[in-house]
Amino acid sequence: MSSSPPSLDSVVIAADILPTSALPRHQDLEIKDAQVIFGAVWRDLESTFGRDQLRFPKEIILLGGAPGSGKGTNTSFILKARGLTCEPVVVSSLLDCSEARRLKDAGRMVGDRQVIGILFARLILPEYRDGVILDGFPRTQVQVECLKLLVDRMHALRREFYPTALRAHFRHPTVHIMALFVDEKTSVERQLKRGLDIRKHNDEVRRTGLGELHEERATDYDLELAKSRYRVFKEQTWDALQSLREIYHYHLVNAQGSLEEVEQNILRELQYQSSLELDPRTHERLRAIPVANDIIVHARQELVKRLDGYDYEHPELLTRVVEFIERKIMPIILRHAISGVALVNTEDALLDDPVALAILIDIFSERGFHATVDLHRIEIPDTFDLATGRIACRVKKVFRIQVRFQGSEIRRG
């Protein structure tokens, strides 16, 4: 077993030199057998890295979308929403060779063998251990099948290494498919606008010598090629993504609107769900603790029932708590109306009753405040026995009440 992974350069080279009996080089772009492709790539990864170093990302976000759907624009926002810091893996950039470029410029796809070999090698790099965004994968049904095989192997490695000291490196994988959708009209308009913006930028760079030239794509200047790119996406990539929706966490994001609207759509789709993302063992241990969202669904109705119940079952106690709040707490709250935080210490025996404490907290909740109560017991010397030198103490109970609310905004300057 190797102790540390080799450099990416060596991996990329190795990924291109597979046994000729399994994968003849001249047939690389024509192979449509996912089992053959995956098997060869996996054997190469094991021999290059060592089995104990096949540590893939905990979270894989497959970001797909039509040309002009805003994948590049929204990637940084998605990374922030998921708490990831690594750069996204843009599959088209991994395959930046002359042959691949000719295919892309013609609106066609790069071969599955190239994609799988180089991509899977990249995913083992340490910076992607917590999670990664894959921009532009999968794009074909063969790539879909290879992804399924990869996730199956990740689960198998998790089971294999779980009883060992390496278990922390083989985590329960989470796969999200995030598809940004725009219609053909929007896609073509955005492609052509991008072309005009890039051409204007590059003309300015050439004129002034300041800045860097941006890549110019033939499809960004030709209406028919732009339409062709969209059709290729719909016929191949879109179908590939749809085939995964019943297997992994699928998010269809409407990307037609403004940037702010799209970001809100993304946030709604990526709301945390522990049952989907935690290791099943971990989730089972936590299952007895309710989820906050479940608790608050009927919280208001439950609060109303409790307060009405106090009035029916403990009317005198309810009246005493209301008077206590009016007399001892509200004057202090009013003096702290600007800060929005009031702290009250009291030794009032009323709060010795746990029902009174519950009533106090519920009253504040109903009125829009957030109240918490801490009980502090303080021992105070009471008597001293001269014969024995023993000090008897009495316990002083102090209730510390904190009330928070929306403070007043003061205009400054």
Image: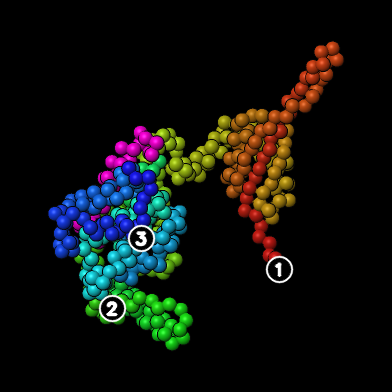
Whole-angstrom CA distance, mark 3 to mark 2, is: 23 Å
Please state the extent of the stretch shown in magenta in the rendering.
138-167
Give the quarter of the image for residue 226.
bottom left
Counting from the top left corner in percent of width and height, residue 357 is at: 62, 34
In the shown orientation, is residue 296 left or right of residue 265?
right
Q: Secondary structure at mark 3?
A: strand
Q: Mark 2, residues whose alpha carbon is within 10 Å: few (<14), some, or many (≥20)?
A: some
Q: Which residue is mark 3?
A: 89
**Callout 1, which amino acid?**
Gly
As displayed, is residue 157 above or below residue 104?
A: above
Relative image position of residue 124 (x, y in whole percent): 35, 52
Q: Residue at x 71, y 41 (%)?
A: 344
Amino acid bearing label 2: Ala
Q: Is residue 228 above or below residue 118?
A: below
Mark yes or no: residue 301 visible: no
Q: Residue under circle 1?
A: 413
Circles 1 and 2: CB distance less than 8 Å? Answer: no
Q: Nearer the viewer, residue 349 or 275?
A: 275
Which disc, if any, is residue 78? none
In the image, farthest residue toward the right: 386
Residue 218's disc number: 2
Foreground tag (3 vs 1): 3
Image quadrant where residue 155 sits: top left
First along the sequence among labels 1 and 2: 2
